[in-house]
């Protein structure tokens, strides 16, 4: 499934570039679909991405959203999009992008006991994330002024929401006696007993899942065919296993029962990395918080090219070329 998603994203990026070449070469001003003129915009976006899950966090009890961010683990997201606009206030967006997520208990700063357990847990993860989604874009101010042809602002706020597909594959680390860190894929290790008969409520999780992208942004029109913008893109997910941490510690003897010897040896070391020997956590003790699914969000900088417009259709020129109401 991962190869298919990568293939889809690569083909999508190639399609965007090919569309630019064909349409610009033909000097097309719009695309006609079903008898209606549809403005088509393509572009690139990039910006910092932040993970919201069980690992890491700040002082105090674990919480959600901005208060629980670890800025040292900020990663870069990059991608491309295509938007089809039936009018100036409604659009349909298709996007494909790549990012990278990470979480680490060791970087938690402690000043009390509330966060000491999470730091003592000492788990970490990292994962590539590939995603593709479609969303509805709504420009509220343009919608309210849709009957006013003279309303052509350069700054246009918008909101959006949709449905997407993303692929992740978490890795955790083991540091050997020489201080060298090795990374291992966690999904085949079943670190919380997913799929084990002794834990019937813990099903194997899929590495490719649905998410719900949503957010808001603002677009600034540089000309009739180019714009820049900033955007907050939040993804609601339906899994708590992006970081492979969700419930409680399991009986470690089960790794030898269900896994090949090599995998069982890695699982024994990586599922419980609390320091010491007598203080290691017991089966049934809390490992994560299954009440809140994992999520991630990005702050994006966007550059868009409108294939359905030319410089003569710039909002500045449109206002200048209209006949006055009184002559």
Image (cartoon, rainbow, N blue to C red):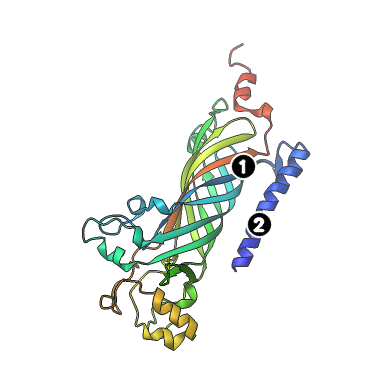
Q: With respect to residue 249, does 21 lie above or below?
A: above
Q: With respect to residue 65, does 323 lie above or below?
A: above
Q: What element carries label 1?
A: loop
The residue furthest right is 26
The residue furthest top is 327
Asked if residue 137 lies left or right of residue 10, the reply is left
Quadrant housing the C terminus: top right
| Residue 193 visible at all | no
| Mark closer to the chain start, 2 or 1 | 2
| Residue 290 visible at all | yes
Q: Residue at x 34, y 83 (%)?
A: 251
Quadrant housing the N terminus: bottom right
Q: Where is residue 200 in the image (x, y as percent from the top left)?
A: 39, 82
Q: Which of 53 and 40 is in front in this view?
A: 53
Q: With respect to residue 153, does 294 lie above or below?
A: below
In the rendering, which numbered label is found on residue 162?
Answer: none
Asked if residue 185 lies left or right of residue 285, the reply is right
Q: Is mark 2 on a helix, strand or loop?
A: helix
The residue furthest front is 178
Q: How crowded is mark 1: few (under 14 residues within 10 Å), some or many (20 or more)?
A: some
Res 240 quadrant in image:
bottom left
Mark 2, residue position: 10
Q: Residue at x 58, y 35 (%)?
A: 227
Q: Residue at x 53, y 45 (%)?
A: 137
Q: Where is residue 296 in the image (x, y as percent from the top left)?
A: 44, 55
Tell me whether the residue at label 2 lies in contact with that at label 1, contact meaning CB atoms closer than 8 angstroms.
no
Q: Where is residue 134 in the image (x, y as percent from the top left)?
A: 56, 53
Mark 1, residue position: 86
Q: Residue at x 38, y 61 (%)?
A: 104
């Amino acid at each position: 499934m991962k190869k298919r998603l990568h293939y889809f994203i690569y083909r999508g990026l190639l399609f965007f570039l090919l569309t630019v070449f064909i349409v610009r070469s033909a000097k097309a001003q719009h695309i006609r679909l079903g008898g209606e003129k549809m403005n088509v915009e393509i572009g690139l976006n990039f910006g910092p991405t932040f993970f919201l899950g069980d690992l890491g966090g700040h002082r105090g009890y674990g919480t959600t959203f901005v208060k629980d961010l670890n800025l040292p683990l900020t990663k870069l997201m990059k991608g491309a999009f295509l938007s089809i606009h039936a009018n100036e206030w409604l659009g349909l967006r298709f996007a494909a992008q790549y990012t990278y997520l990470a979480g680490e208990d060791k970087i938690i700063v402690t000043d009390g006991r509330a966060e000491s357990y999470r730091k003592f847990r000492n788990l970490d993860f990292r994962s590539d994330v590939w995603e593709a989604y479609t969303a509805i874009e709504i420009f509220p101010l343009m919608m309210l002024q849709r009957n006013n042809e003279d309303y052509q602002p350069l700054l246009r706020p918008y909101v959006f929401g949709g449905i997407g597909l993303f692929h992740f594959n978490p890795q955790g680390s083991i540091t050997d006696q020489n201080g060298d860190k090795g990374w291992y894929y966690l999904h085949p290790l079943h670190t919380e007993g997913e799929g084990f008969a002794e834990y019937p409520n813990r099903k194997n999780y899929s590495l490719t899942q649905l998410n719900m992208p949503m957010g808001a942004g603002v677009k600034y029109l540089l000309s009739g065919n180019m714009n820049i913008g900033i955007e907050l893109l939040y993804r609601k997910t339906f899994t708590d296993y992006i970081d492979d941490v969700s419930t409680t510690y399991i009986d470690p003897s089960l790794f030898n029962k269900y896994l090949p010897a090599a995998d069982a040896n890695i699982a024994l070391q990586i599922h419980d990395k609390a320091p010491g020997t007598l203080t290691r956590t017991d089966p049934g003790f809390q490992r994560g918080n299954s009440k809140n699914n994992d999520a991630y969000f990005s702050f994006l900088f966007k550059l868009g090219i409108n294939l359905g417009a030319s410089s003569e259709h710039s909002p500045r020129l449109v206002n200048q070329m209209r006949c006055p109401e009184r002559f």
